[in-house]
Amino acid sequence: MSELHESSSPAAALPQGLALRSARFADLDASAFYAIARLRSEVFVVEQDCPYLDLDGRDLEPGAEQFWIDVEDAAPEGRVAATLRVLQDPDAARIGRVATAPAWRGRSLAAALMRAAIDAHDAASPERPMVLDAQSYLTGWYARFGFVQHGEEFVEDGIPHTPMQREPRAAA
């Protein structure tokens, strides 16, 4: 598990008591993954009323990486303020499961996670594009990070989504 803390990193702008972390599943401790999975379930299954199996097996893939913002001194179940994961699809890195706990919204935590995930991807695989399926009302937000619509809108779990892609840094 790594903590991102360089002065130019997205973590530098986080409020005191928060730490931006990333890890592959094999390097996660059980309580960290539990808190990540709990937040995802809280947001996507309960809040957005989408009964689906969040634990889809993709977190276990060797290339899957979790990014999250850890709340120091919080109870284990509430220690994650925001999270996202990056998967390695055959042709692109895929960002998904972007979620922020209701109590932490409006503080740019998801933006810090997006910048950290993009920076890590660009450092490791600048030749590969990144993709995501944005809830359609958030396409403008994802565009701030260089993502553009890359396909037709579709409905998943009753929510309109838009496929988006960010071109490889090497091609930009």
Image (tube, helix red, strand yellow):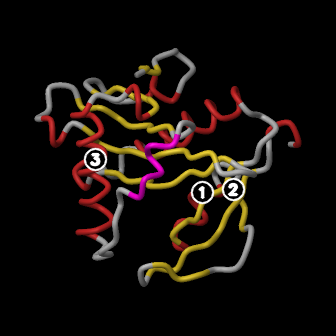
Q: Secondary structure at mark 2?
A: loop
Q: Could you tell whether 128 is left or right of 100 in the image? A: right
Which circle marks residue 2 in the picture?
none
Camera-near label (2 vs 3) is: 2
Residue type beneath disc 2: Phe
- In the rendered image, residue 61, in percent from the top left (x then y), is placed at 51, 43
Q: Which residues are magenta?
A: 56-61
Question: Which residue is identified by label 2?
Answer: 147
Residue 9: x %, y % from top left: 54, 24
Residue 108: where, in percent of width, then height? 42, 44
Residue matched to label 3: 104
Q: Amino acid type of disc 1?
A: Tyr
- Where residue 129 appears, as percent x and y from the top left, is 75, 48
Q: 134 above or below 112?
A: below
Q: CA distance from mark 2 to mark 3?
A: 24 Å
Q: Earlier in the sequence, mark 1 or mark 3?
A: 3
Indicate the secondary structure of the residue bearing disc 1.
helix
